[in-house]
Image (cartoon, rainbow, N blue to C red):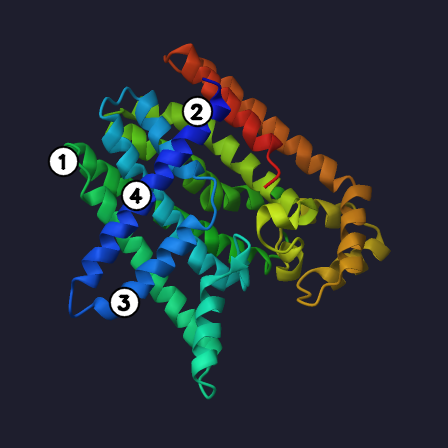
Amino acid sequence: MEMRDYYISLKKRIDDELREFFEYRYNQIENNIELVEFTDIISDLKNFVMSSGKRIRPVLFYFGYILAGGKNKEEALKTSISVELMHSYLLIHDDIIDRDDFRHGTLSLHCRYRKRIESDFKDIDGQHFGISMAILVGDLMASLSYEILNNSNFEEGVKKEALKKFNNIVGNTIFGQLMDLNLDQNKNLDSEMIFKMQKYKTAKYTIEGPLHLGAILAGADDKFLKLLSNFAIPIGIAFQIQDDIIGVFGDEKKIGKPIGSDIQEGKKTFLITEAEKSANEGQKKILSSALGNENLTQNELEAVRKIIKDTGALKKSENKAEELIEEAKKSISYFSVDNKYKKALNDFADFIIKRKK
């Protein structure tokens, strides 16, 4: 079976596990007379998770388990959805921080709750209510993610280590988010600061964390986890660089949110900082006017795109992502695993650099 077909098959099984879990929790709440009024919340969580998503994190969780020689594959697959719920919890809060109105082509959760309450109560502060609801519902999603891992049928020792790792992933991601928030205030911003932020906000959370979790549950030692990190960290930073490129030059229908939202939010990405570094005075003025402009027009976005290309920032970002992918690929030779798994790692690296959404 080709890697792409295997991934599609695995993603379908993960989606089935997610639906089954939410149905189980919905029935639990529905049958609890004190909490029955909150069954709609479980439906909201299910709809948010199932609306889209590539399931990269649970796939990597499962693959980390297999790479480390794990035998209880069905239990690993069931448990893998814990990282998808963790991802969703962080996305719900991230949409609030970034003031994103859309996620997966539909309204973000805080916007959805705002619209609901405003349609029923005209004199309420809908924005505050929507944000408050989304924070709490995101917290509930986090508790569910821990519940899945904690209730998994693995030996208590490895499960304890996995839970420690789970906490570590969430903590690192929050530190990465804090770095991201503070980058805009830094007058001496350089690429190393951006890569450090991307390491914590993306690489450790999207790639390294899920691989480590699966491997830990399979009983992997520190040496094996280090090998996984050597592959995962450069892949994760390349993933974020590619994400930033897609966010400016991608297809809105494919990514599920407005193109240029990073520009509107004034995010300091590698792509943007490289453009600013090489821009002339006229170009810097255009960039300064566009960054953080919530009312950015299509013409203004096109002007920013042209500057990113003309300054060489786009090419430099693409080259950096490719350089990181090659670094990750070189680490694959150090794994003492079947060649089919090495090929799978290599194919995943190629997917990261070629993806369009």
Dot placed on the residue nearer the N-terminal end, 4 or 3: 3
- Secondary structure beneath label 1: helix
Q: Name the front one of labels 2 and 1.
A: 2
Residue 235: give its label: none
Q: Name the front one of labels 4 and 2.
A: 2
For disc 1, the marked residue is 156
Dot placed on the residue nearer the N-terminal end, 3 or 1: 3
Dot placed on the residue nearer the N-terminal end, 4 or 2: 2
Mark 4 vs mark 2, CA separation in Å: 26 Å
Q: Name the front one of labels 3 and 1.
A: 3
Mark 4 vs mark 3, CA separation in Å: 27 Å
For disc 4, the marked residue is 166
Confirm or deny contact between disc 2 and disc 1 (CB under 8 A): no
Mark 1 vs mark 4, CA separation in Å: 15 Å
The image shows residue 296 at horizontal and vertical percentages of: 72, 63
Confirm or deny contact between disc 4 and disc 2 (CB under 8 A): no
Mark 2 vs mark 3, CA separation in Å: 37 Å
Residue 38: give its label: 3
Residue at the (24%, 54%) spot, across then down: 25
Residue type at mark 1: give it.
Glu
Q: Residue furthest bottom?
A: 123
Q: For the N terminus, which image quadrant? A: top left
